[in-house]
Image (spheres, rainbow, N blue to C red):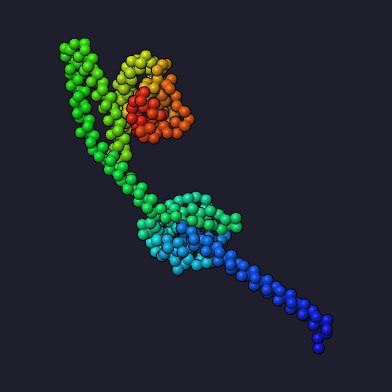
Amino acid sequence: LVPEKSVFEFEILGEAMNRAAIQLTAQSAELRAAGDRMQTAIEALEDAFVLYDSEDRLVMCNTRYKTFYQMSAPLLVPGARFEDILRDGALRGQYAEAVGREDEWVAERMAIHRAPESVFEQKLGDGRWLRIAERRTPEGGVVGIRVDITELKRAQERADAANRAKSEFLANMSHEIRTPLAGIIGMTDLALEGALSADQRDYVALSRSSAVSLLDIVNNILDFSKIEAGGIEVEHVPFQLEEALGDSFKMMRLRAQAKNLEFSVLDNSSLDRDLVGDPVRLRQIVVNLLGNAIKFSERGAVTLRIDAVGRSNDSVRLRFSVRDQGIGISEEQKARLFEPFRQADASTSRTYGGTGLGLAI
């Protein structure tokens, strides 16, 4: 026999358990409904979505995600570890960058995954490109988005190929364009040595000056095109700094004198040996910098300073600094200094001419 009091307590306990079971059932239904709503939401995304927990186990992903990683699809189930999924895909050739270096690639990718605050691109084995963004969740998991950028990449590749073709064409035209201009300059030089009237001498001198200016512009355009086309080779030959730049300094001094500007070179390098490098390209860079300084200065002085800022037994680092009293440049314009075909503004091009390639080169 059970005491009446105990029967009463059992009834209370039974009612409490029933209520708890009902509440748990309701909460489970709510959780399932919330999960269904979440799954419906991520399935509606155009991009691939994935969520891993703090133990790096898969929580959920949408169908779009599985279509990107079809080779790993059998492993894309809740509870699967990210590294296992990743390694399986690498071994199956799912990632283009991993082929032939699977272990190394998995280690690199895991390092990015453990610090998921970056956006990067990934090429798949089937040729598609993805842009991947991963972020750490408050609970310590990782949420990720994959965007298919294949068409964007292909458009960029087509544009790059067209640009290279243009640059290669211009680079190949170098001889055909420069030779006639050099011929014009040579003929005008011969004409200036002959007996000419004052007017004729002015006309021929103007023709020569125009041809030289045109040759400078053509040289810059062709050199920049060669750089873009990968056709510029930097030489490594012995040379002396003064010998390489001396004639250029004389030419710059004449240009400065024509504008009533002072011109000076302060060589503090104290070089006692020949250098090894590309004197032609060095001369081109220095002439471009000095030419800009003289072109944009209407008064004062233009000074080139050469300093040795690093020296060892077999190398020296030289710094060439140009100081002038030109028109100045705003902070906004400084950000665009080395962009090709750029000048401060349209009025600068109209007033001073040029292609906007000197600093880019």
- 131 relative to 199 in the view: left or right: right
Q: Residue at x 23, y 21 (%)?
A: 208
Nearer the observer, 257 or 16: 16
Whether residue 96 is visible to the viewer of this picture, yes or no, is: no
Taking the spot 19% from the left edge, 26% from the top edge, the residue there is: 183
23 horizontally vs 290: left or right = right
In the displayed structure, would residue 3 be above or below residue 40? below
Name the spot of residue 204 as percent of width and height, x first: 21, 18
Residue at image position (28%, 41%) is 166
Residue at the spot x=35%, y=25% of the render?
A: 350
261 above or below 278? above
Residue 245 location, quadrant = top left
The furthest residue to the top: 198
Q: Quadrant of residue 283?
A: top left
- 207 or 247, nearer to the observer: 207
Query: In the rendered view of the protein, which quadrant contains the N terminus?
Result: bottom right
Nearer to us in this view, 287 or 43: 43
Residue 178 seen: yes
Residue 358 locus on image (x, y percent): 35, 30
Give coordinates of residue 180: x percent, y percent.
19, 28
Q: Position of residue 246 (x, y in %)?
A: 31, 21
Q: How many marks?
A: 0
Would you place residue 252 above or below residue 8 in this image?
Answer: above
